[in-house]
Image (cartoon, helix red, strand yellow):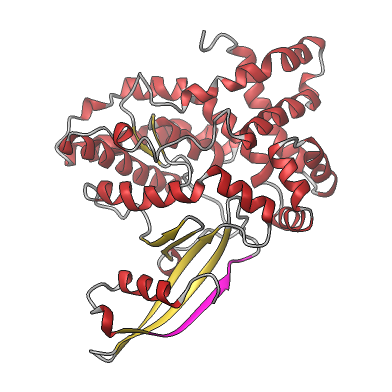
Amino acid sequence: MDLLSSDECHLIAHRTIPEIDKSNLIILNSQLDAGSSDLMGYMGEYYKLYLEVEDIGEKKKYFLHYFIKSLPRKNEPQREECARKGVFPKEAAVYTRLLPKIQQYATKKLFPECYYSRPDILVLEDLTQNYRHLKATESYTLDHYKLVLEHLSELHAASIAWEEIEHLNIYENYKDVLTELHLDSNNSWYITGLKAIVFLAARHPQYQTRKAQEFVQDKLYNLLTKAEELVEPSQAIRNVLCHRDAWDHFQIAKYCSPTLDVLFLLYIVAPAEVRREIYDECLEHYYRCLESYLDRLGLKKDLITREIFMKECHRTRLAALLIWALTEPQTKMSPSIFNRLRSQEPEKFDYYLNVDRSDLLLRVMEIQPGYEETIMSPIRELVDYLMENENLND
């Protein structure tokens, strides 16, 4: 195994079962398997690690399973991009420095254990031992959305409890960790994505009138950049530690408005037609759960009132619409096309992601049926919203 040394594997095993004397713990076998090719690792590669260990004092064997995220090892442009953005150090810090503190105030398990980290690797608890992803043929039900919202509300309530009980401010204490890696003008992926939104809007059949084209060419880009303000700590609502990527890992966790987590789930995970049906019920469910968790923790339920929460959902809707429009072209690209382009044309793919995405979008439109229609859906909703709310933040 060239990804981890034998000493590192021994350390990982001991951290998993620390009750065993380190000198009595030996590794009998180790196996490293690459993750499924269907897993699209935008910020790295995925592996499964299996360790067979023995406590020679008690003569007892253990079979340990781990999920590993690594910087890309073969794709140099992708590796440089991931290293440049500092995703791994941030994620490791969130797992090891913040989440264990917050977990003290929660009743549910909020995150997988992180057993080891380097600047290029994370070794995490393998949650597939007890959970599974939905199959491609399965869809979220309302109960699924409510379950995620319950966990998010407890994460938020527990982060408030940590601040209230230990008299600290998460943002001030962990400003070095909680940097914005997503909607940030210094992020080339983000700026390239904004240009791609303008490109798609200009092609959209709904916006082929002179008036619409003038709006797209002259105003749209500047209006899109206003979303950056919405991911900063809010002045209107109590801020919390937000997951900000509630279908994956804590790569872009941030101290900000709790509505960003709620809206991310409803705009990025839920299909638009489903979201419109369940939107009000999900907002109400999240808020009732938040009230309940705050009450259980002995905190005032009016730290976040229903009125303020609903107003904040309206204020931060632009950020949700924008993230949907930014991510849909990548998340709805078939894994086979994505992986083939990234592996066979790494330099060009890096150019697509961080300089100009228009040729990539046109290529995929030609070879993936239904792709253009799919990625135009968030464009329509986002542009309509901005045309109706040009003076939103004036």
In this rendering, the answer to whether 228 lies above or below 174 is: above
Residue 310: x and y in percent read 39, 23
In the figure, is residue 249 to the left or right of 323? left
**Within the image, what quadrant is residue 296 found in?**
top left
324 and 19: which is toward the camera: 19
**Within the image, what quadrant is residue 222 found in?**
top right
Residue at image position (67%, 62%) is 74
Residue 244: x and y in percent read 46, 39
In the figure, is residue 392 to the left or right of 9? right
Find the residue positioned furthest to the bottom. 59
Residue at image position (29%, 53%) is 108
Q: Can I make out residue 309 in this image?
A: yes
Residue 263: x and y in percent read 47, 33
Q: Magenta segment: does it hold 244?
A: no
Q: Main secondary structure of the magenta part?
A: strand
Quarter of the image for the N terminus: give it.
Answer: bottom right
Q: How many marks?
A: 0
Q: Can I make out residue 385 in this image?
A: no
Q: Magenta segment: does it hold 29?
A: yes
**Within the image, what quadrant is residue 17 found in?**
bottom left
Residue at image position (79%, 53%) is 345
Give the magenta range.
27-36
In the figure, is residue 382 to the left or right of 26? right
In this rendering, the answer to whether 68 lies above or below 97 is: below
Find the residue positioned furthest to the right. 366
Residue 233: x and y in percent read 38, 26
